[in-house]
Amino acid sequence: MSTTADGAAKLGPVHRLGLQPGMVVQELGWDEDVDDDIRAGIESIVGSHLVDEDYGDVADVVVLWWRDDDGDLVDALVDCRTDLGDGGMIWLLTPKVGLPGHVDPSDIAEAAPTAGLSTTTSLTMAARWAATKLVTPKSARAGKR
């Protein structure tokens, strides 16, 4: 096994998030139930700590921990978009099916376009958490130019 494969194995599925060294990753929705291994894996890849909602600049990636009873998902996603730089992505982490706080995939599928986003990838991140990648549709990005 190569060194790269060894590193990916140690990070688990976090290596599949498309993160790169030097990226600024903003974390929103933190609570006691988040997975610290996921957080540590992200920090290991980007080479710095996650920034929080008080960060005063744009982020490359927003990691949003979200549970069914956290409020309005569309509002949260719109808020995340304001924190993203051009070409940024949101990773929405939700409790897996059957666990308290589970968010139905159809709710995510409905909220994303209302917030001006597209869903692109879904991953199992840990025993408790699933992740959905949300991005600004290419047509919307082209219109910004």
Image (spheres, rainbow, N blue to C red):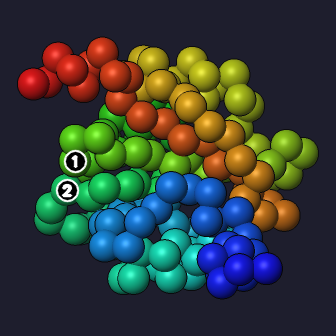
Q: Position of residue 8 (x, y in %)?
A: 67, 73
Q: Is residue 25 left or right of residue 145?
A: right
Q: Position of residue 141 (x, y in %)?
A: 24, 25
Quarter assignment of residue 68: top right
The answer to whether any part of residue 37 appears in the image is no
Q: Is residue 23 left or right of residue 64?
A: left
Sequence order check, earlier mark of 2 and 1: 2
Near-viewer residue (77 or 15): 15
In 3D space, how far apart are the residues under numbered discs 2 and 1 (Cα atoms)?
A: 5 Å
Residue beneath the point at 36% across and 82% down: 48
Q: Position of residue 93 (x, y in %)?
A: 61, 52
Residue 25, numbered label: none
Q: Which residue is mark 2?
A: 58
Near-viewer residue (61 or 104): 61
Marks 2 and 1 in Cβ contact (< 8 Å): yes
Quarter assignment of residue 7: bottom right
Q: Residues within 10 Å of mark 2 (few under 14, many from 20)?
A: some
Instruction: Identify which amino acid the numbered label 1 is placed on.
Output: Gly
Residue beneath the point at 56% across and 56% down: 17
Q: Is residue 110 left or right of residue 22?
A: right
Q: Residues within 10 Å of mark 1 (few under 14, many from 20)?
A: some
Q: Which quadrant does the N terminus fall into?
A: bottom right
Residue beneath the point at 31% across and 73% down: 22
Residue beneath the point at 41% across and 26% down: 117
Query: Against 112, is 11 above or below?
Result: below
- Residue farthest to the left? 145
Instruction: Identify which amino acid the numbered label 2 is placed on.
Output: Val
User: Which structural element holds mark 1?
Assistant: strand
The answer to whether any part of residue 100 appears in the image is yes
Q: Which quadrant does the C terminus fall into?
A: top left
Q: Which residue is mark 1?
A: 85
Query: Against 37, is 28 above or below?
Result: above
